[in-house]
Amino acid sequence: MAQKLILDVNENPKKIRSWILFAFQHIFAMLVACITVAWQTGLSIGPTLISAGVGTIIYIIATKGKSPVFLASAFAYISAMIAALGLGVSKGALTQDQFEDLITTPGNMNRNFLAVILGMILVGIIYVVVALLIKKFGTKWLNKLLPPVVIGPVIMVIGLGLATSAVDNMNTVGVTGGSQYMSLLMGFVAMFITAICSHFGKKMVSLIPFVIGMGSTYILSLILTLIGRAAGVPALQIVDLTPLTSLDWTSWKSYINVDFMFINAINQEVQFTPMMLGSVFIIFAPVSLVTICEHIGDHKNVGNIIGRDLLNDEPGITRTLIGDGVATAVSGVLCGAANTTYGENVAVVGVTRIASVGVIFLASILTILFGFIGPLTAVLETMPKCITGGVSLILYGFIASSGVKMLINEKINFDHTNNMIIASVILVVGIGGLTISFALGDSTATFTSTALSMILGVILNAILRDKKEDNLSEEEIDRMIEEQKKRL
């Protein structure tokens, strides 16, 4: 049973102030994860934010405004992006780690940007092809392939799989000489303020707990940082102001971010050859199948929260996949990163009970604005990871709890051995982080733990059909047990 929504999918806030505050919650929720992809691949943060906003708008249009989902850069493609950036680049005497450091150096034009663009366009095409196949053959097979006993534990894996990210962010010291204890303290402050506002807050306070939690903790951290800088106490410095202080205020490039991927591809030093197309396919195609599995799991979770079947009813999996795929292709051209559904924003919808697509649309517009304007991008970059990590304890935990809720609502009977085995394997594989990587030429394809847990769950569900005794009455089961005792 879905929780009652304060604002349904097709409803919008009546006050502009409320609309803006609700939108900022979605921006804050996805911020660090979104720009982390740019940090780890050495690509530009501004275009990454712009791509998240543009991609979400494309998704909203494709799904006819019926799915409250925010899209942003996908972690699953980081290794593929680095591999593609290195195609055709001379490794020389560098070790693999040194070579990857070189490939992920910001501003380095000796990288294969065009290979990444083509890879992301390929991913978009694969999404659209899969969507059209589903449209032709229907969606009934999806419910049989992915019943609640599979999807529930997978949703738990998605949330708990992000737990290490939240903890790592809380432990991140953003300033040289800073204190890990202060980072942890600010993370817990953000978490407690958010939790208290959500539970005890009245009226607007209960609807914007993430804005209040992250915003107030950021202000506190900034005050402590300024005191620490003035007093020469590094332990009090939490906010890294480098993104702001390093801006060249005399250059127009500091005010407007136009460092798009297609511009880099035009100016790249490495030569792209047609022979590289096969490598691009090998690098990106397997990952796209993995993220399609995650796409299905995320949309099952969203539908469970808002009480609608987004995959079988409106807008339907055909539209959600097309929206996600086209968004990824466009994002690849703009920033190089694939777009994907963000669990953080799904959790915001669940916690605040505000599922308004109009709010998400405004968040997309504001994200594009922040991405274009250099100083605004720099301000967002100064948000300490420890603060987002603290709030993520709630966000990621909510995702995992949604999986538990699905199992309860669907009345999955764990007295049945097959259900217990299916859930057990999914949870252990997913939370344990089991992955499978295999070499394809000079590249490596990897099945993530989330995708692998879903695949194994599907296989086990197909094999372990209900036994005859699973449908027996309690009296019949008791009689059968007594007969077994007599044989012993």
Image: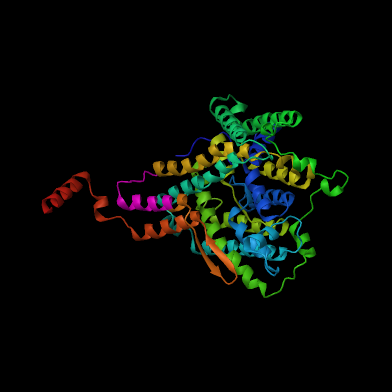
Residue 116, placed above or below residue 188? below
Examine the rendering and report whether any part of residue 404 can be seen: yes
Q: Residue at x 74, y 49 (%)?
A: 46
Q: Looking at this rendering, what residue extends furthest in the bottom direction? A: 275
Dominant SS in magenta: helix
Residue 400, placed above or below residue 130? above
**Percent x, y for residue 360?**
64, 42
Foreground of the two, 265 or 438: 438
Examine the rendering and report whether any part of residue 18 can be seen: no
Foreground of the two, 332 or 383: 383
Q: Is residue 404 magenta?
A: no
Q: How is the image coloured?
A: rainbow
Q: Residue at x 81, y 44 (%)?
A: 247
Foreground of the two, 176 or 368: 176
Number of marks in the rendered image: 0
Q: Is residue 95 left or right of residue 397?
A: right
**Percent x, y for residue 212?**
64, 30
- The part of the chain drawn in magenta is 410-428
Q: The N terminus appears in which quarter of the rendering? A: top left
**Percent x, y for residue 272?**
72, 71
Foreground of the two, 423 or 86: 86
Which of the 4 image quarters holds residue 29? top right
Q: Is residue 414 left or right of residue 37?
A: left
**Percent x, y for residue 209?**
60, 31
Q: Looking at this rendering, what residue extends furthest in the right direction? A: 250
Residue 139, placed above or below residue 199? below
